[in-house]
Amino acid sequence: GAGVSQSPSNKVTEKGKDVELRCDPISGHTALYWYRQSLGQGLEFLIYFQGNSAPDKSGLPSDRFSAERTGGSVSTLTIQRTQQEDSAVYLCASSDSGGRGHGYTFGSGTRLTVV
Amino acid sequence: TQLLEQSPQFLSIQEGENLTVYCNSSSVFSSLQWYRQEPGEGPVLLVTVVTGGEVKKLKRLTFQFGDARKDSSLHITAAQPGDTGLYLCAGARSGGSNYKLTFGKGTLLTVNP
């Protein structure tokens, strides 16, 4: 597609439930990133995928968070047993290169609210 | 941890005024990017600067990368209501993790008509 597509745009879930967030990157972009944006905080790096290389998962805040990227394209971020502190906007981005901090194209994000 | 501090945190001005926002760090970055984010949307890349001392202009916006590549500024001339938004700076580290951007918390700019 023309841009990075994320779904759902909004998600309200009960504490303890699992959620899946989806990201469709720009076609042909080899690098895909997940960031989290909390109120009053900057964007926090979560995970990075580049081609067929092992992902950099160093930003995932706990083992309740996981992500996969199938076929080098679509990615899913899964949060298990959600907690209220997981409430945030989850942003996905893609780029045509993972090197030298090339500019990202972001999706519009998924606003997650855990009640 | 490499931190990017942005100032001011909030800025409210009248249409036609000039403004400068700052992005500072004690660490060196191989490149630095500026993004603008509007409510309900993801950040949109405005510019990437990679060379110390580099100045880039985008219409009424002027971006500068510090000589030591530790800081940057964004100057807007004759601000317009359409410039309203959250301005974010983001730095790329040197070395093997240069894909990983460190973001500042942003400057929320409101331009009143």
Image (cartoon, rainbow, N blue to C red):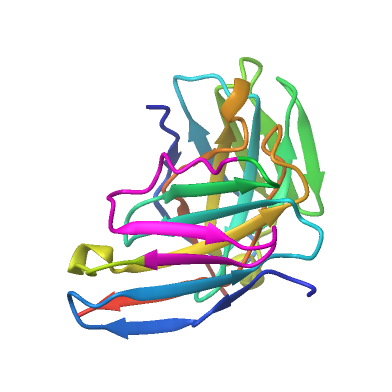
Q: Residue at x 49, y 82 (%)?
A: A8
Quadrant hosting residue B99: top right
First to last magenta residue range: A54-78
Q: Is residue A106 magenta?
A: no
Give how far across and how far down residue B41 sits, in percent.
56, 72
Q: Is residue A36 left or right of residue B43?
A: left
Which residue is located at x 77 percent, y 32 percent? B55
Along the line of sight, which residue is nearer the eye, B87 or A55?
Answer: A55
State whether residue A68 is above or below residue B50: below
- Asked whether A64 falls inside the magenta stretch, the response is yes
Nearer to us in this view, B45 or A50: A50
Q: Position of residue B88 (x, y in %)?
A: 53, 50
Name the residue rendered at 68%, 46% in the picture. A52
As drawn, is A7 to the left or to the right of B52?
A: left
Name the residue rendered at 41%, 39% in the picture.
A58
Q: Position of residue A2 (x, y in %)?
A: 80, 73
Q: Is residue A39 left or right of residue B99?
A: left
Instruction: Say if A17 sits above or below A51 in the image.
Output: below
Residue B17 visible in the picture: no
